[in-house]
Amino acid sequence: MPRGRTPYECFKNDRHRLFALMSRDVRIVLVAAILGGAGLAGAHPALHSLMLGWMN
């Protein structure tokens, strides 16, 4: 991979780039939903403080 380029610019096919970006965004949303749900449910204090730290 050439230096100075983001990983998503190195795809030769726009469709593959789109799928990679969408999967990244889905992972971010799922992690936020899981941490948010666990924090709101009062699961584990360490998980709750981690979630609050990310939100601030």
Image: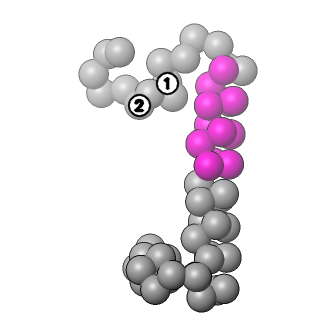
Pinpoint residue 24: horizontal percent, then vertical percent.
Answer: 59, 42
Asked whether disc 1 touches disc 2, contact meaning CB atoms under 8 Å apart, the reply is yes
Nearer to me, 35 or 43? 43
Q: Quadrant of residue 14?
A: top right
Q: Quarter of the image containing the N terminus?
A: top left
Q: Residues within 10 Å of mark 1 (few under 14, many from 20)?
A: few
Residue 44, labelled with which disc?
A: none
11 lies left or right of 4: right
Q: Is residue 18 magenta?
A: yes
Q: Give me the residue at 58% from left, 71% from top.
A: 35
39 lies left or right of 6: right
Prevailing secondary structure of the magenta residues: helix
Q: Which amino acid does label 1 sit on?
A: Glu
* Observer able to see residue 52: no
Q: Residues within 10 Å of mark 2 (few under 14, many from 20)?
A: few
| Display coloring | one colour
Pinpoint residue 53: horizontal percent, then vertical percent.
Answer: 40, 79
According to the picture, the residue beneath numbered tag 1 turns out to be 9
Q: Give the range drawn in magenta.
A: 16-27
Picture layout, residue 18 above or below residue 25: above
Pinpoint residue 21: horizontal percent, then vertical percent.
Answer: 62, 37
According to the picture, the residue beneath numbered tag 2 turns out to be 6
SS for callout 2:
loop
* Observer able to see residue 26: yes
Q: Give me the residue at 51% from left, 28% from top.
A: 8
SS for callout 1:
helix
